[in-house]
């Protein structure tokens, strides 16, 4: 048997007994340049199945209960039910697993922000894919409001913000930067290069600001891994895939959480 794959974990979610994980590129079977734990859905089905099997074994869920969606950088949310292959066709960027279902919900990223949410009272969970467009479209709000409408109390929800592109590397036009800042917080703009008309955006700070605005407590929002360049998908080529760095040669990381 292969070694268990290394996953990045949230202490907050772990202590609340939610099985979950953020993948790195280590521990899978995909060939270069996607080596080795690639979760892209339309590439190599045999490698993907084995990578998903390893993920399921490491996190602790049935691989047949892994639900994903067709991610489109919008605000739509889907509740996992029925056949995973059909749910994968649905366009959405937030995915909810119902308590007691045993369902695992996952989203794929290569620079965008993965957010895992959990309601410790009900056991209901959500996985959210939030790039800058999703942040502006308020997909994070859609997920938190859904958990709230299902009986969750926002101030008691738990959140883990996973590996994404850091403010060291996330350069956008000043217009895009202002759009993100208006939708979140002025401090989402980490640095300006006025002469070039460019700004550097801190997407983690933007998502954190949205979560706080939705009523989550600061203590319940965890950054995984640390908020340094070591946690930036573009900087850390050894651990992470990055679309900004590798373009079409980039694999996809996964963030997954299981309802309890
Ligand atoms: Zn970076």
Image: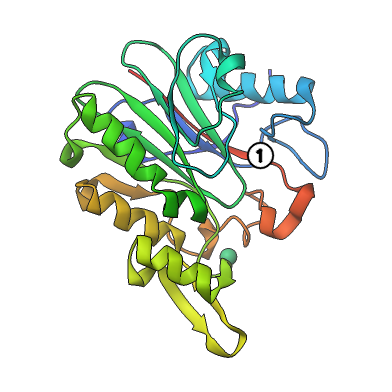
Residue occupying the point 37% across, 44% down: 140
Residue occupying the point 63% across, 49% down: 240
Lateral position of residue 228 relative to residue 247, left or right: left
Residue behind mark 1: 26
Q: Give residue 21's position: percent from left, percent from top.
A: 47, 33
Q: Give residue 61's position: percent from left, percent from top.
A: 49, 16
Point out the residue furthest to the right here.
Answer: 32
Vertical order, 178 against 93 (above or below): below
Can residue 210 be seen in this snapshot?
yes
Vertical order, 28 against 163 (above or below): above
- Mark 1 close to ligand 1, CB under 8 Å: no
Residue occupying the point 71% across, 25% down: 48
**Which type of secondary structure does the marked residue at label 1 adopt?**
loop
**Marker count (numbered):** 1
Q: Give residue 236's position: percent from left, percent from top.
A: 62, 58
- Quadrant location of the N terminus? top right
In this rendered view, identify the residue nearer to me: 72 or 187. Answer: 72
Q: Give residue 56's position: percent from left, percent from top.
A: 55, 20
- Quadrant location of the C terminus? top left
Quadrant field for ligand 1? bottom right
Vertical order, 191 against 161 (above or below): below
Residue occupying the point 27% across, 36% down: 145
Lateral position of residue 233 relative to residue 158, left or right: right
Lateral position of residue 103 relative to residue 168, left or right: left
Query: Dot 1, crowdedness within 10 Å: few (<14), some or many (≥20)?
Result: some
Can residue 225 be seen in this snapshot?
no
């Amino acid at each position: 048997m292969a070694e268990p794959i290394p996953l990045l974990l949230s202490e907050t979610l772990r202590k609340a007994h939610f099985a979950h994980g953020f993948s790195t590129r280590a521990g899978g079977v995909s060939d270069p340049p996607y080596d080795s734990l690639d979760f892209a859905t339309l590439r190599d089905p045999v490698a993907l199945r084995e990578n998903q099997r390893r993920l399921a074994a490491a996190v602790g869920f049935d691989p047949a209960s892994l639900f994903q969606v067709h991610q489109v950088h919008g605000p739509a949310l889907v509740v996992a039910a029925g056949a995973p292959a059909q749910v994968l066709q649905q366009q959405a960027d937030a995915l909810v697993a119902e308590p007691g279902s045993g369902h695992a919900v996952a989203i794929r990223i290569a620079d965008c922000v993965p957010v895992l949410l959990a309601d410790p009272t009900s056991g209901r969970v959500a996985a959210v894919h939030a790039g800058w467009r999703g942040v502006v479209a308020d997909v994070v709000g859609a997920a938190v409001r859904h958990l709230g409408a299902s009986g969750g109390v926002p101030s008691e929800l738990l959140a883990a913000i996973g590996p994404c592109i850091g403010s060291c590397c996330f350069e956008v036009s000043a217009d895009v930067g202002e759009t993100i800042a208006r939708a979140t917080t002025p401090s989402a703009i980490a640095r300006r290069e006025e002469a070039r008309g460019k700004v550097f955006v801190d997407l983690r700070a933007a998502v954190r600001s949205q979560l706080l605005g939705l009523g989550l407590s600061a203590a319940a929002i965890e950054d995984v891994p640390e908020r340094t360049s070591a946690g930036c998908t573009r900087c850390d080529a050894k651990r992470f895939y990055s679309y900004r760095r590798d373009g079409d040669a980039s694999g996809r990381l996964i963030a997954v959480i299981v309802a309890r």
